[in-house]
Amino acid sequence: MIENDYLLAWAAYAIAALGCLLVWCRLTNWMWRYLREPLRVLVAVWLFAPTIVDPGKDLFAPAIAVTALDLLFKVGNNAWHAVADLAIYTIIGLIVYLLLVALRWPLERWWQNRFAAKTPVVAAEDEPTMREVLARQAEPQADTRIDRNGDRRLRIEPRL
């Protein structure tokens, strides 16, 4: 295998792995965020983790492919080395993900608190009761479809 064939094979694998990762992202869209993201990290690490196949020539191959082919065809002895590389890369990927979550969590809480303080809270005590609304409807000039903020009211709910 010449250098161009080697790079061409890696490019084809990278495109196929990106397609698989895209499909995996679409499959996990419905999940809870803190379950979806680690699963995506795991699949990304498993798809893109390289392992060395020939130390003399510095040739690498995808670790998941080396593991699968060595176990399926029972040729070579690179399976355990590839599994070890997969485990190391998985641990590193999850640690990096946990560090990013630990950084993101306080920032998200700060961001939510910042905007929660700016939005006005409409108290239920300020809203008119059904009796008051009906009394206003009896008056010909009152329009109860628009509240005091200028927004349209689509329905009136009774206060319990």
Image: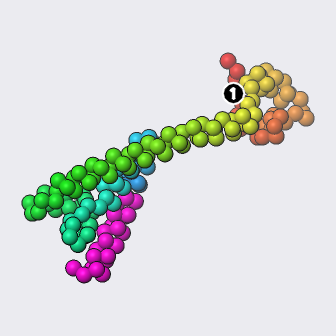
Quadrant occupied by the N terminus: bottom left
Q: Quadrant of residue 104?
A: top right
Quadrant occupied by the C terminus: top right
The one nearer the camera, 146 or 148, is 148
Single out the residue that lies furthest toward the right.
Answer: 141
Q: Residue at x 24, y 58 (%)?
A: 64
Q: In this view, does 68 lie above or below 134?
A: below
Q: Which amino acid does label 1 sit on?
A: Glu
The one nearer the camera, 56 or 18, is 56
Label 1 sits on residue: 157
Where residue 121 appears, x then y in whole percent? 73, 31
Magenta segment range? Answer: 1-22
Where residue 23 appears, x then y in whole percent? 37, 58
Across the whole image, how many numbered discs are drawn on residues?
Answer: 1
Determine if residue 37 is in view: no
Q: Is residue 102 above or below residue 79?
A: above
Q: Residue at x 20, y 61 (%)?
A: 66
Is residue 97 found left or right of 124 in the rendered image? Answer: left
Q: Is residue 131 above or below residue 9?
A: above
Where residue 101 appears, x then y in whole percent? 49, 42
The one nearer the camera, 74 or 124, is 74
Q: Which residue is drawn at 63% across and 38% down?
A: 110
Q: Mark 1: give few (<14), some (14-19) or many (20+) Cα within 10 Å.
A: few
Single out the residue that lies furthest toward the front.
Answer: 56
